[in-house]
Image (cartoon, rainbow, N blue to C red):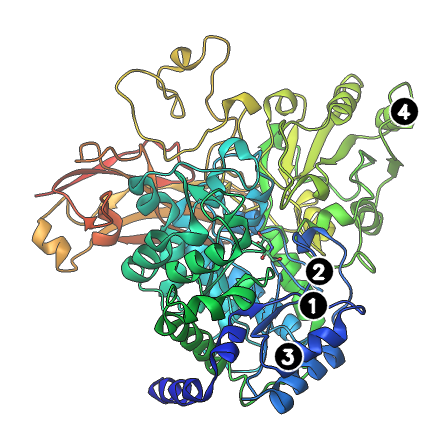
Amino acid sequence: MENIALRVEELLSKMTVREKIGQLNQPETPTEKTIEEFKALVRKGEVGSILMSVGATAGNDAQGAISNEFYNEIQRIAVEESPNGIPILFGRDVIHGHHTVFPIPLGMAASFNDELVKKSYSDIASEASAESVHWTFTPMLDLARDPRWGRIIEGTGEDPYVGARVAESVVKGLQGENLSDKGNMIACAKHYIGYGASEGGRDYHRTEITDYSLFNYYLPAFRSAVKAGVKTVMSSFNDISGQPITSSSYYLTDILRGKLGFDGFVVSDYDAVIQLKKQGVARDNADCAKMALNAGLDMDMHDFCYLDNLEKLIESGEVSEETLNESVRRILTVKMEKGLFENPYCYGGEYDKIVHLKDAEDLATESIVLLKNENNLLPLSKSANISLVGPYATEKRSLLGSWCIDGKTDGMDNLLDIMRKTCEGKLYYSCGYGLGWDSSAKNSYLSDVVVMALGESWSCTGEARAVSDISLPPEQIALIKKIKSTGKKIVGILFCGRPIAMQEISDDLDAIIYAWHPGSCGAQAVCNVLFGDVSPSGKLPVTLPKLATHIPLYYNVTSSGRPVNCYYNENPANCYVDSVPTPCYPFGFGLSYTEFKYGETKIDNDKISLDEVLNGKKIKVSVSLENIGDFDAKETVQIYLRTPVAKWMRPLRELKGYQKVSLNKGEKTEIIFEIGAEELGYYSPQGEFIVEKGIREIYVGENCLIENKKEITIC
Ligand code: NOJ
């Protein structure tokens, strides 16, 4: 590290101001038209990084293939022909897979399987780095409580603790033990900060977040990414209470570096620097560059605002050269840590695609949440006569989900393909919707059971793709009603990116499998669960509301003086006069084919002094778990805390730990959680971590609604 610091200083001392500014410049991949001009920039040392895509919402658009020859040639010019031979950092949106596509991140979160998530990101890193990508703009850590927001699919849902656990797994999976090893990639925690709180779920909209909420809800995932060693952070498009993040030294420097201890570099979001004018805080481009760099934003994505304006600003003293140097130091440090100076070219490495596909299948299988299974309709027997209907039976693209630039449907199976391979009985298939007396209804009469492949299109999810209504499309609801009228049992498979409103469909479906947008092997994953080769084990990382009008609805809500909250069924009649906004399926919920018996929660000590807590003593909370059903299965045991009296109001439940365990039928185990200061405290609005004396309620079990409370006292 010291060595890197010395090398950086030595290099910095040789660079002109213009070259230094060049390191802060991240244009996107040139087109055929602009390539010569672009190469000239590289030759002058004016390109620090390349955004390997074309267009602002890269993941939503078809992109050209990556060519190692192309990027190696650009790199050659940088290394051999630019003044100081500084290699370029290539960054691409490799969000939930490269060629092998894993489930959307919200689905991954539902797996509650940290190890598998970590392994998957290590697979992703090896695939993408074999194609010149050094740096990916993931993990996306925006806490989101509004499912209308299209980007809710890219994050981990409504809970800061889940966000923190996933952040650690993704960063460690991508960056590996040693960043410079081949096959590892630089991670980027984004979008810092508060982007998921955009008003009305409308992408890029304003946000209002108090510091109390910021420290306790929005920052934990970023804090965890920093602790896991994330090298870069992307600032977000939004403002918080009138302060654009792009130009905020409060958020970018005081909190991110001061409170969280981040020491890598910050990249802007696409054109966000120049957008400071539109946001109404900067007069002109020079103003934009000055504000952003002075706030602590190191690299400028796409808009050339730094390259075009910083030289003059430094001459005039509006930006100090030391501020510029500091940003260059951070960027060069990451390049050296990545080993770019030693290995600037793409090695075009090999990887085992079969292993990656298997990991993608396993993760997709574990992300599936079984919401309903009336009279144990599932698993289906492979010899049953089945009717498969619904628009997602032959769909492939939507199964891949939104942000997958390099994931293609070629060679991928859809649900019908896999069911054809799996079913031993008769399989009747009817395509489309059919609104009259058509084959879907007729086939339903012929079969023992109807499997309906339903969901939402990938094109309604992701960046700039908010929806105002989170219900299933009306044609699909009509189709459910039509099939229901046949009297047959229905299994609904929901391929959805976001939480959808469930009330209108949950009664009509006898079994419900929430499969998310599950990636390249999603259809196989669904069949693994549908036919009982694997017992479902996903749990909801986000609440599924009954109605869209119940948004926002999240489990870690605070209490209120008058009866207004009914997540936990308190005062249901008082929330709205026309409906009861209890969740249709709560946070942490997910059924299994087996039955798990939880023992009594035990606490090794129900009193602990504050001094002991602050000195690192922990309370042991244990529970026995027995698989008393007929299937080998996995269960995610969850521990929630509540502080009934505190200086600032605390949530009615807060997830503070989870363990996913695998138990064969008849097997029993003991789960132990250790609860210490980290779990018992919280942040004041000033960002100080505090642990208060008093009572803590402890709940251990299978979802956030468990009621078997234990108490401990901190005295
Ligand atoms: C805009 C998106 O907000 C961000 O997530 C992405 O990484 C960049 N564009 C680059 O494509």
- Position of residue 233 in the picture relative to residue 462 (left or right): left
Is label 2 in a helix, a strand or a loop? Answer: loop
Q: Decide: few, some or many residues near mark 1? Use Cα within 10 Å; few <14, some 14-19, many ≥20.
A: some
Tell me which label, 2 or 1, sits earlier in the chain. Answer: 1
Contact check, label 1 and label 4, Cβ < 8 Å: no
Contact check, label 2 and label 1, Cβ < 8 Å: yes
Q: Which mark lies nearer to you, 4 or 2?
A: 2
Q: Decide: few, some or many residues near mark 4? Use Cα within 10 Å; few <14, some 14-19, many ≥20.
A: some
Residue type, mark 1 in image? Thr
Tell me which label, 1 or 3, sits earlier in the chain. Answer: 1
Q: Which mark lies nearer to you, 4 or 3?
A: 3
Q: State how far apart marks 1 and 3 are (Cα).
A: 12 Å
Q: Which residue is mark 4?
A: 442
Q: State how far apart marks 2 and 1 are (Cα).
A: 6 Å
Contact check, label 4 and label 3, Cβ < 8 Å: no
Residue 54's disc number: 2
Quadrant of the image containing the N terminus: bottom left
Q: Residue at x 40, y 67 (%)?
A: 316
Tell me which label, 1 or 4, sits earlier in the chain. Answer: 1
Quarter-of-image position of residue 450? top right
Q: State how far apart marks 1 and 4 are (Cα).
A: 53 Å
Quadrant for ligand 1?
bottom right
